[in-house]
Amino acid sequence: MRRLATLLLALACLLAWSAPARTQESPAHAAAVDQRAARQLLVMLRLPPRHYRPDGAYGGGYMTDSGSAARRRVAAELAAAHGLRLLDSWPMPAIGVDCFVMEDAGGAPLERVLDELSRDARVKWAQPLAQYQGMGGAGPDPLYPIQPAAHDWHLADLHKISTGRNVVVAVVDSGVDSAHPDLAGQLGLRRNFVDGTLDAAESHGTAVAGIIAARSGNGVGIAGIAPGAKVMALRACWDSGAQGTRCNTLTLAKAINYALENGARIINLSLAGPADRLLQGLIDAALARGITVIGAADPARADGGFPASHPGVIAIARAGDRHPSSSAIRYAPGTDIPTCVPGLRWGVVSGSSYAAAHVAGLAALLTELRPRGAAQSLRRELEMSNATALRAGTANAAITADTTGNIDACAAVARAANACVCLCSPSTATKNTLSP
């Protein structure tokens, strides 16, 4: 399955970049189009029986037949009588109607107008202008179908309720590729705290940022957990080849301090190391200000290591890892995760760093819904998710063998929004509702 996912990823990336560029419709324009469509209706007038024998040169005689002007006069009379504006028409001889598009001009309820039109002997039928959408998940993102969160967390359903709009997530990590097409416009700012080196686009930081906030519905790559969030890209680490991604006390301290002083609502620390007094003090200051701090659990340490084990930090491991001595660690998708890679590419990553990024994105969704007390809400949701697993009799409630983990993202968003999300009963959203 891993090999198949990798092949699908490579093919999707190739297709994404070989396809012609598309013009993206702005959300404001799309909303205006939808609002206007909601005021429009279709009125069908009968066409005369077909009386011609079209050949290869026939171009559609119903556009110019002698009755066309008469039907248009009837349509104009109907529009005027019902406070409508006649916009357009199109003959449809295949079903024997001339379709007229009309728009509300007087503010009368369309349901009443439709009923009156349907009772007019000149009208075959009248109906609203319905809207449809392609069934492609969370937009035309080619790699969306193989994202674990797409199916395990019902990401498309979550995005109907929240996208983490304008929530600032500090990614304290190696450099983030701001030119990547899935991250273009997603970085609120970037700073480099690694002395003696230039800022750079690096693999670890770019992958973490992509999971959290990659653009959704832009025709390439993936959809982030919180595509409406703004990433504060704070380079406190550097990619060093065979030694992996490295950081130190000072670079991390400078970055965390910057996040505290510049409006971060969430700090993602996809890293681990020894306990450190300076960093402990800065994390405590962040927690005291109501900032959510997410830490990646070290799979080599039973307690998850630091900063995951620090009180108040939300410790996240990837589903399938084992930390039996720590009940505080939660598990999220972290295996074979498609995400952004520097150089306008995408790749597959695995590890608790990327599980933590999922939860940082979830925290952004909850913060948009409940700006005050988001950190406490998230901790409570994670506790409730684990309690639900225990009640369900899972063999090991803290660990699941699949990619899902023990976090119920749908339930968390449903309670925060006080609304039904994903596959739930109408009463689900009102249970265990959190106070603002």
Image (spheres, grey):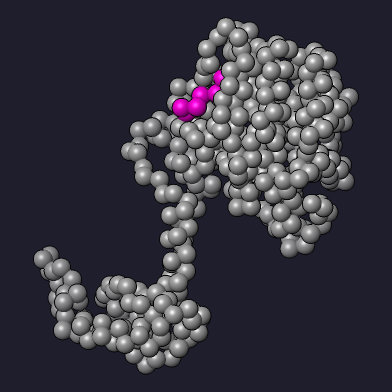
On screen, 322 above or below 238?
below
Q: Which residue is drawn at 81% across and 41% down?
A: 376
Q: Is residue 268 visible?
A: no
Q: Nearer the viewer, residue 253 or 24?
A: 253
Give the quadrant of the N terminus: top right
Q: Which residue is drawn at 45% across and 32% down?
A: 181
- Picture coordinates of residue 8, whole percent (x, y): 49, 32
- Picture coordinates of residue 291, whole percent (x, y): 75, 34
Q: Residue at x 36, y 45 (%)?
A: 23
Prevalent SS, magenta region: loop
Q: Which of 228 and 18 is in front in this view?
A: 228
- Picture coordinates of residue 341, whole percent (x, y): 51, 24
- Picture coordinates of residue 163, whole percent (x, y): 61, 45
On screen, 387 above or below 43?
above
Which residue occupies the extreme front position in the image? 261
Q: In which quarter of the image is residue 59?
A: bottom left
Residues shaded magenta:
174-180
Q: Nearer the viewer, residue 250 or 332?
A: 250
Q: Is residue 278 left or right of residue 81?
A: right
Q: Is residue 350 left or right of residue 296?
A: left
Q: Is residue 436 left or right of residue 60?
A: right
Q: In which quarter of the image is residue 122?
A: bottom left
